[in-house]
Image (cartoon, rainbow, N blue to C red):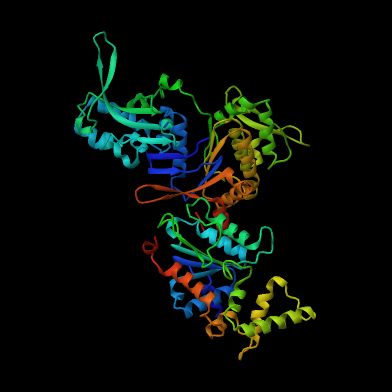
Amino acid sequence: MSADAVVLCKERRPEILVVEGKDDCHGIYQFAAKKGLSNYFGIWAGDNDEQALSQFGGLLAVRPADRPSILGIVLDCDTANHSPEPLTRRWQQIQSRLDDRGYAIPKTPNANGTILESPNIGVLPRIGIWIMPDNVSEGMFEDFLLSCVQTETRIFAEKTVDSAKSSGHADFNDLHRSKSVAHTILAWRDEPGKPIGIAMKMGLFQTDGELATTFAKWLESLFTIPSSETS
Amino acid sequence: MLDSFYISEFKAFKSATLENLRRVNLIVGSNNAGKSCILEAIRLWSSNGSPSVIRDIIRSHDVDISTFRRKRRSRDEFLELDDLFLEDEAEDPVRFLFHGFHYQTDLDIAISLGPSDIEERLSISLGLYKTTRSEDGVPRRTKVEPAMFSDYDGESELVLEIRPGRSRRFLYPVDTLWLRRGVIRPSSLDELPSRPLTIVGTAGVSSTQVAQLWDRVSLTPDQDRVLECLRLIEPRIEGLTLVSEREAASSSHRIPVVSLRGEGGRFPLKTMGDGVTRLFHIALSMVNARGGLVLLDEFENGLYWEVQDQLWPIIFKFAEEFDVQVFATSHSKDCIGGFLDAVATDRESGALFRVEKTDESVSIDRIPTLNASDALSAGVEIR
């Protein structure tokens, strides 16, 4: 698993999706596999959001011949800095990496996931941007995962986690509440405590809900449709 | 300031543009990718197409001009048309100026260099001219048309047509470039406004040039700025002057010496290490190019990375203060890193370009500096 993980989370190919952590890498890879999309792109995982942004920006700086033809990024909408608010801040961070290149960048992210066609095919990649969980709300990859869990189960797990925190049994950072909830739910499965990627593979998340379908559609249009058909 | 710089039909360049130039511009790429060629193009443009610059550029190819002189002489003695085309002209060093040496078959190809404003571009082409005399004996050059070598009748001569801007043109016989007594500058060139330009080559600045540059700033506030810069590497430096070398006291050859705090006597600058000398050349060149251009070829030569990190902010500062536009080349990762750190405080102040050899030409790719910084921190190779 560990040797595979290295290749899986830094696979150099013309179609690359940059994500901000190993859990996201494995989770999204298994999600894509369920949707029959995992062969269309490689994933690069940064250790954190800053590194993922650097990988995303850095891949735009390599020689045109070595540049990806399609470059997507999935980031959480959870920046600790609240001025400006997280979604705006995220959007600005991504936008600054695309400045001066001729991309038609909308003012705000598209709720169905943003796709920017290449202004210069063969030189600049098509760009895809997804801000977890849903391009609108504050949150992270785990909030997306929680949308793939039965509502009753999720609410129960949230109550449990909140009660653990308020009674002094938990010391997680409040920013990571949904991460705690997601792993709590995984701790209650038949094989407790599976990592997110494996859990996704085992079918512990439902991937046919509204948000999951929108995300899958975004991945599909980003990576599987040739440029000529979208322009 | 140059807003952009267009290079066409010049040496390795078929056609390429440095877009959106800034005050400080760093050009990166592997060895022989064409970085220095860009600096030559800027120098040539800035000189308004000066024949002595043309000769310098051709000489940088290690062309043995003395051999060529002999050949020309023998050609004059045995003027055979076939020899002329098949051998002599093929060897003519002026071919090094033109992309793909096209001039041999097509005289209409013109080198074009300069900013986006076409009026300010320099154009250089070759033409065949005949000299005739009018009735009162005044010589007059007329162009042989169509300008193809096959029309060469042995009486016309190969002439450089140099157009610094659209409205002026002067003609310069190619043979004159190789005269032993040196290059004669057409007087018409002197009428053109010259742009200040200084160059720090890969091997630095010649001692004659250093003496000229130093004399211009000696005892002025600019001299202090140069010393300030040197103290980055050697904080003990108090003063600097140029003295004649002891062995050749009568010669005009002068070398920089410094006085050091807490030490008696004076010390040749070169004993302070290569870095100090390099820094001296760079600082001296910058303060001497007020309102003009500075070309730094292989910026990092002789400089440790710590010094590069300290030097870049000074270059940005000096460039602003002295209203100088800087063009530097490098193939060092440390150098790029230092540049990117310095530009991060004001991304409008610097631009990064990558040059790369292609099959037929050289491509120039402008890399947004934030993307380049990203690449460095993510360990992605950009050179």
**Residue B86 in sight:** yes
The image position of residue A163, as x and y in percent, is 75, 81
Q: In the rendered view, would you say B154 is above or below A150?
A: above
Give the image quarter of residue B188.
Answer: top left
The image position of residue B311, as x and y in percent, is 63, 43
Q: Residue furthest top?
A: B136
The image position of residue B312, as x and y in percent, is 62, 44
Residue drawn at x 60%, y 61% is A90
Q: In the rendered view, would you say B172 is above or below B267?
A: above
Residue closest to the eye, A142 or B366: A142
Q: In the rendered view, would you say B183 is above or below A4?
A: above
The image position of residue A7, as x and y in percent, is 51, 73
Residue drawn at x 72%, y 83% is A160
**Residue B10 in sight:** no
Residue closest to the eye, B270 or A41: A41
Residue closest to the eye, B28 or B302: B28
Please give left or right for residue B208 compared with residue B38 in the image.
Answer: right
Please give left or right for residue A111 compared with residue B9 in the image.
Answer: right
Q: In the rendered view, would you say A148 is above or below A53?
A: below
Residue closest to the eye, A140 or A2: A140
